[in-house]
Structures are given as structure tokens and as C-alpha cells.
């Protein structure tokens, strides 16, 4: 049964770790649970099982084993781990926390800004680099 309480809602930055109504058979559709700057955030009850997520944004969220991220009408859930790097952009990271791909890669390529991981692993060389990145981010 599709949960009216948890479907088509924005839970960005919130924790549902104490929720006692996320029971087996619950379907959550079209909600956002994104956690800014908190990869693998444990926001659901650790013992939650049998909950199906459809078309949800679960970026930076740890999904306890025994739950399902399903496609609905051909649209999958998203469950990337994302963290801002020293170039001030959001990057998808791997299990070790290493950046693997910049978010909005096509946009950054069109701006002529590097999308290569090796370039962000180096510290900023000057405050001017920071200003240049800020100008691109602000569309200057």
C-alpha cells in the first residue's frame, strides 16, 4: 500500500530514525530524503525492512538491508553519495569517499571547467582560483 504520510513529500535534511510505522509492505513514492553534506546518513530505523521506495531521491541516505529501491513507470530512485570538494562543487563519491564524478558534468564541460577528478584532489593554489570558481557558479 502506498503511504500517504511518506509519499510525495519533502523530507530533506530530516531524520525518520524513530518512525515506527515504516513496516514491511509500505511503499513510498516520489519523496525526497536528500541529506546535504552527510553521505550515508542513517535517517531510517536501522531495523526497517520490506519498505519499497519508488521514484525517490535518497541521495546521501543509507538504506538498511532488506528494503527495495524500485523503478516506477521507468523512473528509478537515486541513491548517490555526494560531497562538496575543495573546488566548491558537489561530486559523487565512492564507498571510500573518493570523488568519481562532478554533479552537472555537462554544464561544467560547457563552461570550460575541468570535470576530471585529478584536478580537484589538489588544493586550491590561490584565492584567485576560488574567485574564478565562484564567478562560474554565479554565472558572472
Image (cartoon, rainbow, N blue to C red):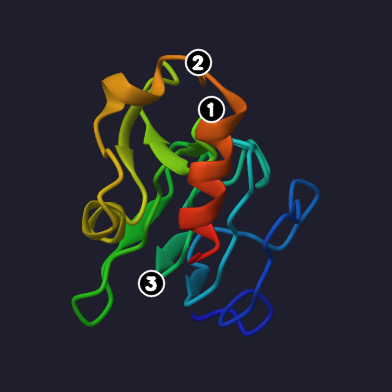
Residue on which disc 1 sits: 86
Q: Residues within 10 Å of mark 2 (few under 14, many from 20)?
A: few
**Badge 3, how many Cα within 10 Å: few under 14, some, many 20+?**
many
Task: Name the residue that disc number 3 marks.
Answer: 55
| Residue that appears at 36% across and 62% down | 77
Which residue sits furthest left?
A: 74
Residue 60: in sight, yes or no?
Answer: no
The residue lying toward the viewer, choosing from 79 and 50, is 79
Instruction: Give the residue at x 71% y 63%.
Output: 21
In the picture provided, is 61 more to the left or to the right than 10? Answer: left
Real-space CA distance between mark 1 and mark 2, rounded to the nearest whole angstrom: 7 Å
Q: Residue 123, percent across and down?
A: 50, 15
Picture coordinates of residue 116, whole percent (x, y):
24, 31
- For disc 2, the marked residue is 123
First along the sequence among labels 1 and 2: 1
Looking at the rendered image, the disc whose residue lies closer to the viewer, 1 or 3, is 1
Give the Cα distance between marks 1 and 3: 31 Å
Q: At 58% from the left edge and 56% from the top edge, which residue is drawn? A: 34
Q: Secondary structure at mark 1?
A: loop
Find out whether the residues at labels 1 and 2 contact each other: C-beta distance under 8 Å: yes
Q: CA distance from mark 2 to mark 3?
A: 37 Å
- Tell me residue 90's x, y (percent): 47, 44
As drawn, 26 above or below 34: below
Q: Secondary structure at mark 3?
A: loop
**Is residue 108 rendered to the left or right of residue 30?**
left
Amino acid at each position: 500500500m502506498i503511504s500517504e504520510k511518506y509519499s510525495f513529500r519533502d523530507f530533506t535534511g530530516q531524520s525518520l530514525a524513530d518512525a515506527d510505522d515504516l513496516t514491511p509492505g509500505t511503499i513510498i513514492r516520489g519523496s525526497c530524503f536528500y541529506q546535504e553534506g552527510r553521505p550515508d546518513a542513517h535517517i531510517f530505523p536501522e531495523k526497517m525492512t520490506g519498505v519499497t521506495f519508488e521514484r525517490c531521491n535518497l541521495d546521501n541516505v543509507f538504506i538498511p538491508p532488506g528494503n527495495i529501491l524500485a523503478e516506477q513507470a521507468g523512473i528509478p530512485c537515486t541513491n548517490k553519495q555526494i560531497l562538496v570538494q575543495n573546488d566548491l562543487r558537489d561530486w559523487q563519491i565512492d564507498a571510500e569517499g573518493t570523488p568519481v564524478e562532478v554533479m552537472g558534468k555537462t554544464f561544467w564541460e560547457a563552461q570550460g571547467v575541468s570535470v576530471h577528478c585529478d584536478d580537484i584532489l589538489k588544493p586550491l593554489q590561490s584565492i584567485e582560483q576560488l574567485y574564478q570558481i565562484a564567478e562560474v557558479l554565479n554565472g558572472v
